[in-house]
Image (spheres, grey):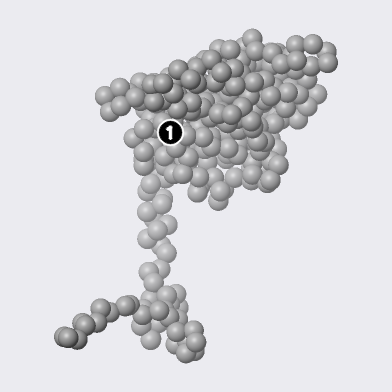
Amino acid sequence: MTYCVAMRLNAGLVFLSDSRTNAGLDQISTFRKMTVYEQPGDRSMVMLSAGNLAITQSVRQLLRTETIESPEGPVSIWNCKSMFDAARIVGATVRKVYERDADSLKNFGIEFNVNLIFGGQIRGETMRLFNVYAAGNFVEAGMDGVCYFQIGESKYGKPIIDRVVTPTTPLEQAAKCALVSMDSTLKSNLSVGLPLDMLIYEADSLHASRIIHIDESNSYFRMIRTTWGQRLREVFESIPNPAWGPDATEHALSQPPAQPEQQALHPIRKVQAPDA
């Protein structure tokens, strides 16, 4: 399992991934799940991967040379004119690996499992961010108001992003939120683990200049892990406990007596059947 998150903001893009892979309790390894495809000054693209490691590694390697047909001839991620076409090429690469490996995997009881986040910017176009599925189809962030994608073990890190991140969030705050999201996932799921890879892309720069490798010795992430848990407990303790009973006024959890047709449900009591 893994956890990856990427955010598309007005100021740029934020990518974060863990590096843990496992094929059983005693087969835990670390592999980088972030890949950067870049021609500085012309295009900068990032892919995060989750799923079967052999599949994702095949997609990563083939993507460097994969092409799709266009009226102008074969198009690759290196010469396509839009991020949409680049995402199409990623999808075509996934389908190519599926055609090659899916039947063999199925014979061994292994599902074709891959999920990708792919985003970046090509000169002359705005930044774009896509979630590419195992069928090779994809959706784009920002089309329905959502400015981020998660793949892998996403449920633990989702609440903080939903409460904090909007398209206008500054890059530094979004990076902090992504790290808190990752820390929440690390805390709750052992299948996600350090080290982490983070990339911060500034809009229109066409170069990924801020790439950070984060391990257990990173002082900022250690501070996040300590401070976030402590502040959560402080906020939790500052919230009043629910008040009960007829004399409760402020922060009362119980409500005034309802009208007969609105009576709350009462516990069901088992009734002893009469002897025959």
Left or right, 251 with reference to 59: left
- The N terminus appears in which quarter of the rendering? top left
Residue 241 in view of the camera: yes
Q: Where is residue 161 drawn, in percent x and y?
A: 54, 45
Give the secondary structure at mark 1. helix
- Residues 233 and 100: in front is 100
Q: Where is residue 34 drawn, in percent x and y?
A: 52, 22
Q: Where is residue 124 drawn, in percent x and y?
A: 80, 24
Residue farthest along the front direction in this orientation? 276
Q: Please, what is the three-letter code of the amino acid marked with disc 1?
A: Phe
Residue 176 in view of the camera: no
Residue tagged 1:
221
Residue at the image position 70 percent from the left and 38 percent from the top: 10
Residue farthest along the bottom direction in this orientation? 260
Specify the quadrant of the image occupied by residue 52: top left
Left or right, 73 with reference to 160: right
Residue at the image position 64 percent from the left and 9 percent from the top: 65
- The C terminus appears in which quarter of the rendering? bottom left
Residue 149 vertical placement versus 214 (above, below): below
